[in-house]
Image (tube, helix red, strand yellow):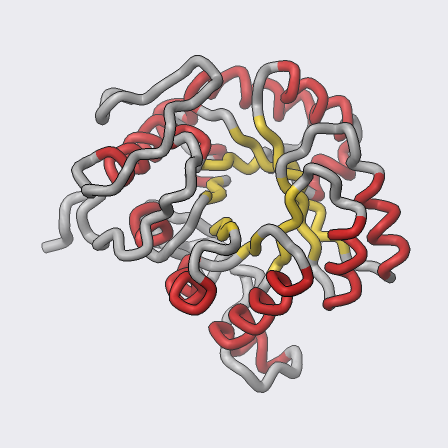
Amino acid sequence: MPAPEGTAHRPTHLSKKPIAVDERMIVALDTPSADDARRLVDELGDRVWFYKIGLELFMAGGYWELLAWLASKGKKTFVDLKFFDVPNTVAAAVGQLRGRGAEFLTVHGNDEMLRAACAEKGPTKILAVTVLTSLDEADLKALGFQASAADVVLSRAERALDIGCDGVISSGLEAARLRERLGDRLLIVVPGIRPVQNRDDHKRTVDVEEAFANGADYIVVGRPITGAADRRQAAMSIQARIVNLFEGGTGLQCPPPATNGTSFPGNSI
């Protein structure tokens, strides 16, 4: 019999960083238009305070206006464009984000690209993409990698940290090894969160509890919320699971309360 929800994974590497509990879940605004994204944000209301805006919305138009609108509503933003280009172009692109209030930006490139991004980042935190969660061992082999996904992730994370990146994007399957080898010196953001058995294009997935037990500071959740019949309830359910981990008798010092005027006491959300 499976363990009750929220109790299956021991919080071995539970994050101690001072992050508000209600900001540890980042919702992916993977919508076909900025108007659809705004409707989703309004629907989720005060249950979600951190949003990821990716390539689909960038191509749909109104990206920067949406970024400004989210900031006006007190939301944090994660620009997930996975910059990959010659270093000078990456540096120039990162420089365009100055003053736009983005918390995170992804770069998916080699050492020189990461170094160029870090030189222009300003207050925005640079997250190096390690290995996409849509890739498994067979995919990496087909791409010419001779190492396992875990080894590639660790190697890229070590180099990113040395270069000056603030954190990495990593599957939750590799997060524990990153914590064991690199400690708390970097942020770990885990996408591909699937609260139940997965049947989509993310191959290296974990659930909410496993991601945080393995050392995630943040999780990114998309389709389990955006594809739900009741999207607000889906977000509330995941937030409750996070609260249970960080405030549910773990014995760890709880992060400070959110400064955005909302709180999630106990499991009431």
Q: Is residue 137 left or right of residue 164?
A: left
Residue 252: x and y in percent read 25, 42
Q: Is residue 152 left or right of residue 47?
A: right
Quarter of the picture holding the N terminus? bottom left
Q: Residue at x 71, y 35 (%)?
A: 57
Query: What's the residue at 55%, 21% (across, down)?
Result: 41
Quadrant location, the C terminus: top left
- What residue is at 69 percent from the left and 29 percent from the top? 101
- Pick whichever, 85 or 260, lies toward us: 260
Quadrant location of residue 160?
bottom right
Check the image and report above or below for 188 versus 67: below
Quick one: 176 or 122, which is closer to the camera?
A: 122
Which of these two is toward me, 1 or 65?
Answer: 65
Residue in view at x 79 percent, y 51 percent? 119
Residue farthest along the bottom direction in this orientation: 146
Q: Quadrant of residue 161?
A: bottom right
* Residue 237 % position (x, y): 31, 31
**Residue 159, image quadrant:** bottom right
The x, y position of residue 12, in whole percent, is 27, 56
109 relative to 74, above or below = below
Q: In the picture shown, does residue 71 fall above or below 151?
A: above
